[in-house]
Amino acid sequence: MTRSYTVRTYGCQMNVHDSERMAGLLEDAGYARAQDPDTADVVVFNTCAVRENADNKLYGNLGHLRPRKDANPDMQIAVGGCLAQKDRDTITRRAPWVDVVFGTHNVHALPTLLERARHNETAQVEIAEALEVFPSTLPARRESAYAGWVSISVGCNNTCTFCIVPALRGKERDRRPGDVLAEVQALAADGVLEVTLLGQNVNAYGSDFSDDTADKSAFSKLLRACGGVEGLERVRFTSPHPRDFTADVIAAMAETPNVCPQLHMPLQSGSDDVLRRMRRSYRSERFLKILSDVRASIPHAAISTDIIVGFPGETEEDFRATLDVVAESRFSQAFTFQYSKRPGTPAADLPDQLPKQVVQERYERLVALQEEISWSENRAQIGREVELLVSTGEGRKDGATRRLTGRARDGRLVHFAPDGAAGIRPGDVVTVEIDHAAPHHLVADGGVRTHRRTRAGDAAEAGTRPAGAPTTLGLPGFGTPPPAPPQPEPACAVPSER
């Protein structure tokens, strides 16, 4: 009998894409996606270690599964991702009913470890210290028929004092440009309209190339090359670092029609003193100059950011500097976090860790300011006609409001009323006029002005998903990639819990 599986995903976009690879590996090994995740024979947790409560969340979820495991010893539980890389043997010590623990560097080993655990009737813990197989060479079960993740690098060479990611993902490893383009072309050939280029620091792309071929403009060249991929309508990327964000990238964004007018640029703090102690290699003036240059070249760009409140030693003056930068930056959206002490990071040992109540009060002030800005920026969209790529699963109230949901080219979420337009599917493209704004979304209730049916919509309607050809890791070089071999289309997507 075919064994069923489900993958539960926590954390960043990189983890979401890694879960697509895990699902692809399992299906290649003969597993089938569980129709009911609560009855899956194999449950895989793809974990995140960035936040302080990540451990509690994992062990709480593992505890909920223990009665099922006790009742059915043939059921298997696997834990992978960043928390597995960090905790290693701790997981099986705290939750001895777990069958497999694997890290960020050996995702490819998941099916083998599951089979070994069944055969040996004992837990298998395998944590590689360095990347063994580049994840993008692995098969994938894509979540979406119309949008795809494409990893251009893994790991990070930065040394931010608050961040545990470099210790868990390792040093930056870059894929060959030709391999990246081959995957992008394969997705577009399968009808995908939008790709997001992924990396811990995407605009440092090229730093891992050998000395004689290192190219600081490799990322801007990659963006321009994506502009020539037939059928590809939208290109996004995340996340860049202000240190490596250069004029050639801005020019590539402005001059490549399918690169979206959207930028996620992490600020972290508006205080130069805090940035110095965070080991962020830029200051607020440099950050604001980047935003100014982007808006000069791309006037309607929507810019979002990440901000940490309550970093050790942050004074009220430091925090006010952050509020000042936020006010000047006019972000469309900000992902705000209270500083989370992570063992193993330099910041965990810094003096002057702030009391929880101080951090909470500052966090609430920052959120209130950004909500006001986001709402103001969204109100400025009223009356604009926007093109939407119709999405699925993003409008939680769509059923009650009889609306559909899509993403504008600048990444804004728009709920719209079909108003009699028939046959609109996820993956189709529509244009609407914005008539209402809220801090986190826009509304268009005036009906659909145009509707374009797409191959992505056909695939979504049929329940098929693109394969995206696996590619190899080799020497870097720009040029025409080889034609991708035909790949079977999997039937549907893996759900994620985020």
Image: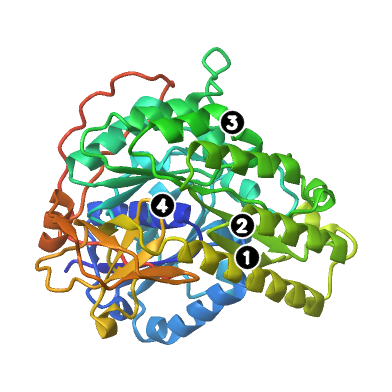
Q: Secondary structure at mark 4?
A: loop
Residue at which label 4 appears: 410
Write the residue at 61% across / 61% down. Answer: 50
Q: CA distance from mark 2 to mark 4?
A: 17 Å
- For marks 1 and 3, the one nearer the N-term is 3
Kindly indicate whether the residue at mark 1 contacts the one at mark 2 (C-beta within 8 angstroms). Answer: yes
Going by the picture, which residue comes out furthest to the front?
Answer: 383
Write the residue at 18% across / 39% down. Answer: 189
Q: Nearer the viewer, residue 209 or 106?
A: 209
- Viewer-nearest of discs 3 and 4: 4
Residue at which label 2 appears: 306
- For marks 2 and 1, the one nearer the N-term is 2
The disc label shown at residue 246, or none: 3
Kindly indicate whether the residue at mark 4 contacts the one at mark 2 (C-beta within 8 angstroms). Answer: no
- For marks 4 and 1, the one nearer the N-term is 1
- For marks 2 and 4, the one nearer the N-term is 2
- Quadrant of image for the C terminus: bottom left
Q: CA distance from mark 1 to mark 3?
A: 25 Å
Residue at which label 1 appears: 336
Q: CA distance from mark 4 to mark 1?
A: 20 Å
Please say which color scheme the image uses: rainbow
Asked if one can make out residue 110 in the rendered structure from this viewpoint, the answer is yes
* Left or right: where 55 falls relative to 309: left
- Viewer-nearest of discs 2 and 4: 4
Could you tell me the amino acid type at mark 3? Thr
Q: Quadrant of residue 407?
A: bottom left
Write the residue at 26% across / 40% down. Answer: 232
Kindly indicate whether the residue at mark 1 contacts the one at mark 4 (C-beta within 8 angstroms). Answer: no
Could you tell me the amino acid type at mark 2? Asp
